[in-house]
Amino acid sequence: MSRITPSRVLMTILRGVIVIVMLFVTLLPLAFMVATAFKTNSEILVFPPTLWPASPTLQHFIDIFSSDGTWTFFRNSLIATIVSTLLTICFAIPAAYALASHRFPGDAGRAIGLGVLMLRFLPPFAIVVPLFIMLRGFGMLDSVGALILVYTAFHLPLAIWIIQPAVAQIPKEIGEAAAVDGNGVVGTLWRVILPLLRPSVATAAAFCTIFSWNEFFFALVFTSTRARTYPILINSYVSDSGPDWGAIAATSLLAVLPIIVLVVVLQRQLVGGLTAGAIR
Amino acid sequence: MSEIPLRSTGGGGLAGPPPARRRLDPTAYFWLLVPALAVTAGFTLFPLVRTLYLSFTNLGISGQADWIGADNYLRMISDGLFWQSVGVSAVFLVVGVLAELVIAWVLALLLAERVSRWSNALRTLFTIPMLLCPVVIGITWRVLFNPQFGWINGILNQPGLDWVGDPSKSLWVLIAVDVWQWTPFLFLMISSALVAIPTEVKEAARLDGAGGLRIFRFITWPLVLPVTLVAVLLRSIDSTKTFELPFTLTAGGPGNTTTTVAIYMYRRAFSEFDQGYASALAVTITIALVVFAMIYLRIVKRVEGAVG
């Protein structure tokens, strides 16, 4: 089977070339961010562009953080992401557990499960106008609290959807044994089931974190000055007078790094979630 | 869990009745659901119903919403800008998803085994585009396509070539970036389905004298088609929702050449505060999506039945 024939050699070369091209295309924007973030302003505006900074500088990072706006943007993003992810997970675990392990009267659990599935695909623009009016009514426009609320509600179906199959896979005997040991529903969930759900909870939390951290549409509509998040900041660097290249690259790099770390650390769960569960 | 009927608790024998009764207490399960249901009902379901209601009103900047019946929907029929945005979204969806599908299939067929062999590093790399912030992607590509100093023109050695600002190119640039971001998604799904085909099956077919094409037609294709079809549905829904990419990459322009339905709805609602009409747009697009998904799933079922 493994004779070396010219066509085999050709295929191997072809595959190698394809992989290299794919890597090049995939990494192009990241390479741009890294290179541009450390270039001087004069070097950025050179044609043809250089790949490696001739005289690397940290000036852009110093510049973006010397305006205290940048801190506020990143702090808002961080708070909205962490709090909404925690809330989502706290709500999702009991809901997923109840849906997967109890048959509700009239098959309501199935209907709710189906509703959850549909809500995962809900376009944000389908609910944005009433949400805007509601949040204005609560006096919550331009507050991080509004973003936390909306992100929690919007990512909840996704989290339930990821955790539910993991609950269903736990053998019934485990829950029954816990009950025999004198645990109630909540005790069983907390002491016995939850430790077994760790991988799926990690996956759900990772996706909530990533989607909240990246979220732009709701942040654009619901915030104006105090509660703006970093994607809004990056968008604002493109002005009529042209883009502020260094600031865009430096801010993007800072925004992207935590995601890349997360993807590398949790790559198995994330790739599994994206392909098998088909998250998006 | 609920298979054990409540009545049998007394006759169980060894297991004591009290824990069993407690476990079967249905109200506890109900209360576990309540927080999630309350948040979802309050902040997604209620607004969804409310959008439907508002679509029959003339809600504007004043905040006053008067019932105007189906006027918004009638207005939509003769709204050229709306139909233009539908056209943009349709081209973006069809061309983008088709391109992603073809590229992903070719790459997966060529590389499936290799990628699974070097798996972790490569798969991680290919996951990155779809998990990055869409705003970062949009702005970065906008800068990469910059006519004067962008890297694309640097690679092509074509200083001054306009991309995003050229109405005949802008939609294609938008599609290209979408393909960059989402081909890996289809690639990962298709290649994981390809890798899942047991080698013994293919070996057996080969020993029976089946050629490469026949193996593809009768083994590979039927096994990978379902995954592909689901992936295409997910991409289609996502593509229709796309807002960030056109907003940051091209700002919907030049003119309205990249104004997708999501961008158009946003402008109506929050630039012109024509929120009743914007609600009607949102309802129409959402219903179109649901209908599309239902028809699609029905066709998928038929296709899968035909392929075996």
Image: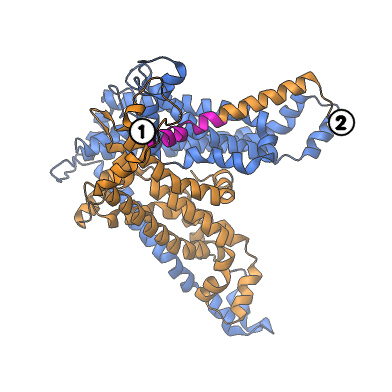
Query: Is mark 2 in CB contact (under 8 Å) with mark 1?
Result: no
Q: Residue furthest front?
A: A55
User: Which residue is under mark 2?
Assistant: B207
Name the mark on residue B193. Answer: none
Q: Colour of chain A?
A: orange
Residue B159 appears in the figure: yes
Is residue A33 within the magenta segment? yes
Label 1 marks a residue whose chain is: B
Q: Nearer the viewer, residue B188 or A38?
A: A38
Which stretch appears magenta? A23-39
x, y percent for residue A36: 39, 33
Q: Secondary structure at mark 1?
A: helix
x, y percent for residue B203: 82, 34
Chain drawn in blue: B
Of callouts 2 and 1, the N-terminal one: 1
Q: Is residue A111 above or below residue A183?
A: above
Instruction: Name the magenta segment's main secondary structure.
Output: helix
If the image is split into quadrants, where does the N terminus of chain A sit? top right
x, y percent for residue B70: 25, 36
User: Which residue is under mark 1?
Assistant: B139
Left or right: A216 as drawn, with respect to A227: right
Would you identify the image quadrant in which residue B301 lies? top right
x, y percent for residue B265: 29, 35
Name the kind of residue labelled 2 in the image.
Leu
Q: Residues within 10 Å of mark 2 (few under 14, many from 20)?
A: few
Q: CA distance from mark 2 to mark 1?
A: 54 Å
Is residue A70 within the magenta segment? no
Q: Nearer the viewer, residue A266 or A241?
A: A241
Q: Secondary structure at mark 2?
A: helix
Q: Residues within 10 Å of mark 1 (few under 14, many from 20)?
A: many
Query: Total marks drawn?
Result: 2
